[in-house]
Amino acid sequence: MTNTKTMLYKYIQNMAKQVRDTLKSLFSSSVRADILALLLNNPDEKFYVREIATLIRKNPSGVKRELDNLEKMGILTNKKVANLKYFQAEKKSPLFSELKNLITKSLGIPGALKTLLKTSGAKLAFIYGSFTENEDAEPVDLFIVGPSSNNLESIKDIEEKFKKKISTTIIDENEFKSKKEISDADLEKLLSGDKILLIGKL
């Protein structure tokens, strides 16, 4: 092996070790993993510390510490507005795409959808149909109560990641309440069947 090839080989080994060490440190705490799941799956959204703590149900002081660590690593960026410091995924980070894919796949479809819908304004969301018994089944039937906003566009990203069709039904909260009040047959059948609850309570 020539000196040039030897140097290149050592450089690649070095880079690979750095990436492995970075990934290991990124997932060394459950708080950090939850923060990454939330922010990397909502890369266009900005969150302040207490908001993140509420969404991932963790102690604010621990969340703040991990946010500062992730910012130092270049994974997150921040912007101060008035007295609040907002954090956001740093999309220019060389690790952004790989981390986002890794987190999405490790969560599975239910976990990825749950993380996405946490910030969507949805009051209720669940998976129903054949996927509840067989994760290889397709399409994945998803029912959402709440504003449609950009949910469908974001759900397309999850479809692409998992190479699986997601059939989504979205109704607003008033329509859902009205159908429940009149004991709508289709809704009652849906609610009484097997489901994977993602957001809200039945």
Image (cartoon, rainbow, N blue to C red):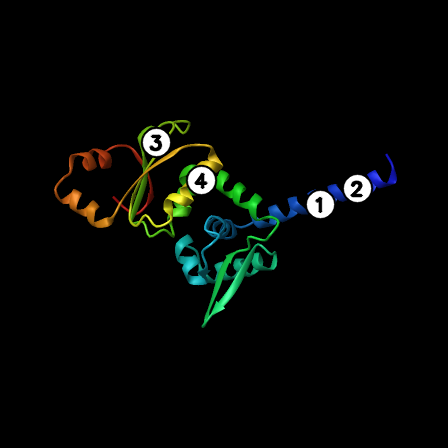
Judging by the rendered image, the residue that carries numbered circle 1 is 15
Residue type, mark 4 in image? Ile
Q: Secondary structure at mark 1?
A: helix
Judging by the rendered image, the residue that carries numbered circle 2 is 8
Q: Determine whether label 3 and label 4 are within 8 Å by CB.
A: no
Q: CA distance from mark 1 to mark 2?
A: 10 Å
Q: CA distance from mark 3 to mark 1?
A: 41 Å
Q: Earlier in the sequence, mark 3 or mark 1?
A: 1
Whole-percent x, y for residue 119 in the image: 38, 52
Q: CA distance from mark 2 to mark 3?
A: 49 Å
Q: Secondary structure at mark 4?
A: helix
Q: Determine whether label 1 and label 2 are within 8 Å by CB.
A: no
Q: Residue at x 47, y 34 (%)?
A: 162
Callout in the foreground (3, 4): 4
Q: Residue at x 60, y 56 (%)?
A: 74
Q: Residue at x 20, y 33 (%)?
A: 189
Depth check: give the residue in front, 78 or 67: 78
Could you say which disc has been placed on residue 132 in the image? 3
Q: Earlier in the sequence, mark 1 or mark 2?
A: 2
Judging by the rendered image, the residue that carries numbered circle 4 is 158
Image quadrant occupied by the N terminus: top right
